[in-house]
Image: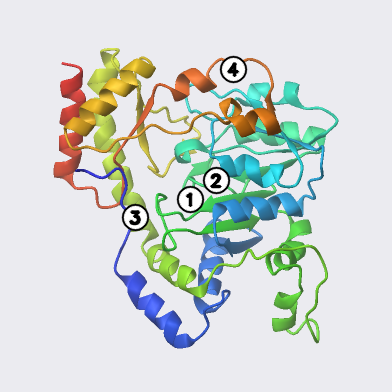
Amino acid sequence: MIDFNRPPFLGTELVFVEEAIKNGKLSGDGPFGKKCQTWFEENLPCKKALLNPSCTAALELAALLIDIQRGDEVIMPSYTFVSTANAFVLRGAKIVFVDIRPDTMNIDERLIEAAITEKTRAIVPVHYAGVACEMDTIMEIANRHQLFVIEDAAQGMMSTYKGQALGTIGHMGAFSFHETKNYTSGGEGGLLIINDDQFKERAEIIREKGTNRSQFFRGMVDKYQWVDVGSSYLPSELQAAFLWGQLESAEEINTNRLASWQAYYDALLPLQVAGKIELPTLPEACTHNAHMFYLKVADLEGRTALLEHLKANNILAVFHYVPLHTAAAGMQFARFHGEDRYTTTESERLIRLPMYYGLSMNDQAHVITAVKEFYM
């Protein structure tokens, strides 16, 4: 069976994990945690980078930082993972979904402004498949209405919009290092980056359970104590050590994935020209990171048939999100503003093909052949 995903692994991760164990500093923000955070601050770049146990935790931390209160509204697409919404629902917010663009599967920036009310506090664009939302328009709307922008860049590490790294455009950006992402910190992991100075100090405090512990270790205070709300948003040093092994080879991983993505695209393009499938769209202003390779078929029935065909050929391909507004919790904690013109229908057409660092040419050729045979 050709797996849908395999976590990236270079080999150096084990060396660094062993070193972290020998250092005896396992609770987080040790030497490897600091190395990773410095790497992000220099390479993205951003005002501050804070490793988290997951992207879910990073989004929850962001919701606390902008002080989301019960009754506030947060605008986002329904076509996303549940954590994007849950982080704000936990603070009492009402989620307001708007439709997506069928070309990129990202939030339709033209529909955001009509969804804004006096209760709106933030916009959360989700960069699907590592392809950027139309951030110039989103930031202009947010600035005009004095709203926060928190980029869900879970899939976006190493992608850019008009030359600027995803996650660095809004007030904050959240990333995932789950095992399905381009880079992993050992199965789970996340990152919150701060792009606005007003959040830098408080982010450290909330992340450290509401204490000024980080300031204490820098010699800024003579003791640390409880000074604000907070929670445990600090990953272990073992996670950071594992991630460091991948950041050292970040370009290698990125190049390998992009080559696989392009091979899929080139081989399947004739099917698009023949009107059999649709391939991903890459806007001119965007560079992507080959987080996934998806194609779209005619309808839900066609998707089911193709998935069954691929499985019969020992290929594990999958569909993606079930739109959140159609779920029981979505109906309870959210509302859909305007018409669901594309969110549901486009989600029902989408299939993700196997994509991971180290995908062999033989396995990829087998996937391509199986897709082509389905349409013969």
User: What amino acid does circle 2 point to?
Assistant: Ala
Q: Earlier in the sequence, mark 3 or mark 2?
A: 3
Q: Are marks 3 and 2 in contact (CB under 8 Å)?
A: no
Badge nearest the viewer, 3 or 2: 3
Residue at horizontal 41%, vertical 63%? 186
User: What amino acid does circle 3 point to?
Assistant: Pro
- Quarter of the image where one finds residue 219: bottom right
User: What amino acid does circle 1 point to?
Assistant: Met
Residue at horizontal 56%, vertical 53%? 55
Q: CA distance from mark 4 to mark 2?
A: 23 Å
Graded by Cα atoms within 10 Å as few (under 14), some (14 to 19) or many (20 or more), the crowding at tag 1 reads many
Horizontal arrangement in the rendering, residue 228 relative to residue 355 (left or right)? right
Disc 3, SS = loop
Image coordinates for residue 197, horizontal then vertical, percent: 75, 58
Q: Are marks 1 and 4 in contact (CB under 8 Å)?
A: no
Q: Are marks 1 and 2 in contact (CB under 8 Å)?
A: yes
Q: Earlier in the sequence, mark 3 or mark 4?
A: 3
Q: Earlier in the sequence, mark 3 or mark 1?
A: 3
| Residue that label 2 marks | 153
Disc number at residue 340? 4
Residue at horizontal 48%, vertical 50%? 157
The residue furthest front is: 328
